[in-house]
Amino acid sequence: MSPRKIYIGIFFCLLCLLLGSAAAKQDSITQGIDLQPIIDRAEENSTIVLKSGVYLGPVVITKPLTIGGNGRAIIDGQKKGTVITIKANGVRLKDLKVMNTGDRHDLIDAAVSLIDSSNCEISSIRTENCLFGINLQNSHNNIIKGNHITSKPYELGLRGDAIWVWWSDSNIFTGNKIMNARDFVVWYSMGNIIEKNVGINCRYSLHFMFSDVNYVRNNHYENNSVGIYNMYSNGIVIENNTIVRSMGATGIGIGLKEASETIVKNNRILYSSRGIGVDQSPFEPDTYNYFINNEIIFNNEGISFITDRTRINNIFEGNIFKWNIQDVTVSGTRGLSKGFWKNNYWDKYEGFDRNKDGVGDSAHKYYIYADQLWMNNPALQFFRGSVVMSFLDFLQRLAPFSEPEFALKDDAPLFKPVEYKWKDEETIRQRLNERIVASKLLLERRGKKGEIPFASECARDSTKCGR
């Protein structure tokens, strides 16, 4: 036999051995390991390090444990409800892939559920084919960090929520990436910090309902129906976020619905149907909302007052309005000049700065011409931005055939877009701190007796959170 044939035979033998070994390894992984007995055998406060492979769920954790997988362990829920349910304090999950929840919205089939649990940490979890991502119910003082969350490949309204927070206070949600899910929703929860997260291709990137005193900062939201929506919640601080392309008929970058004492500061809102939407806000008497130093650029509508019952106590200072089709609109009625407008930059300002102090010599008066047709008649919105509407608007400005609608007056408009110093910030922050104190009293009335610190305190002093 020639040496060439010998080498070829050896090569095929080695190849068969390699393929057989890989197949055997794949069979062992596919077979799976039941994870619940491993958890049951573990002692309290011990650490379980899962090797590469598939571990079968669902599982329930009822004691403090740390479970890590070095990014190579997979926990498969086999489409049987929630994959990992935590009913204990001090549980830590990290570096795991969690897949295959059930399909029940009413049962909130989630990758990870925390029920009556505190001082837990869920970090570096990747979800796949999970209806809901991470679910918190009556769970406080937890950290949800660095997770990659998606939902099942359903239509938008049929997906589950990436993060679902119910009656849970003083949690920190940071560094999470959410894609192709439905909402990040916070119900009846206070004192949470939501920062440095990314939300892409969702419905509501972040939605508050009846949740006072929460902090939203340094997040990036893109290609969602709504960026941040605050409904029936007071004392929310929204600052340093970037919101891009909140499009569609309901598209809003930042929205307020019957919300009071909200601070909206240093945000960038771009390429959206409506940059900021205000609906009957502020709602409580003798309260205010503050819109300070935001960049509102390339939107169809910069600020949209969704109803005429919006109170006047909205303060707009130091904002930048550039290249919006309409800077300010109202739906269905006249009387748009609601709120206090001061030191905003308007690219449509027609004036001078002869003394070079950075402030226009005359007030910026904003009128609405032909566009009031579609504002007062929703059926005509089909023609908004059309050639016909643009031509009518041009004629209305050139030779008005009806009285234009007065929108607003900024007595001291900025002549150039610069960073604005908010002079009243310290006073307003103090008022917010007073609301925090009142909210802590509410926590006591919930039966928690004040032992659970706010997430803002955790961020400043980790010893207050038991870490």
Image: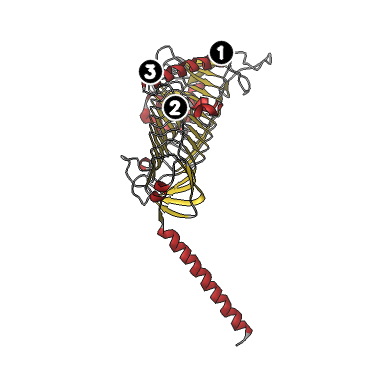
The x and y percentages for residue 244 are 51, 35
Within 10 Å of disc 2 (Cα), the crowding (few <14, some 14-19, many 20+) is many
Residue behind mark 2 = 255
Marks 3 and 2, how far apart at CA? 15 Å
Dot 1: element:
loop
Kindly indicate whether the residue at mark 1 contacts the one at mark 2 (C-beta within 8 angstroms): no
Dot 3: element:
loop
Q: Earlier in the sequence, mark 3 or mark 2?
A: 2
Dot 2: element:
strand
* Amino acid type assigned to the residue bearing label 1 in the image: Asp
Within 10 Å of disc 3 (Cα), the crowding (few <14, some 14-19, many 20+) is some
Residue behind mark 3 = 309
Q: Nearer the viewer, mark 3 or mark 2?
A: 2
Q: Is residue 122 above or below residue 346?
A: below
The x and y percentages for residue 41 are 41, 48
Residue 357 appears in view: yes
162 or 329, which lies in front?
162
The x and y percentages for residue 421 are 61, 18
Marks 3 and 1, how far apart at CA? 24 Å
* Amino acid type assigned to the residue bearing label 2 in the image: Gly
The x and y percentages for residue 322 are 56, 27
* Amino acid type assigned to the residue bearing label 3 in the image: Arg
Within 10 Å of disc 1 (Cα), the crowding (few <14, some 14-19, many 20+) is some
Residue 230 image-quadrant placement: top left
Q: Earlier in the sequence, mark 2 or mark 1?
A: 2
365 or 278, which lies in front?
278
Residue behind mark 1 = 411
Numbered mark located on residue 285 in the image: none
Residue 258 appears in view: no
456 or 261, which lies in front?
456
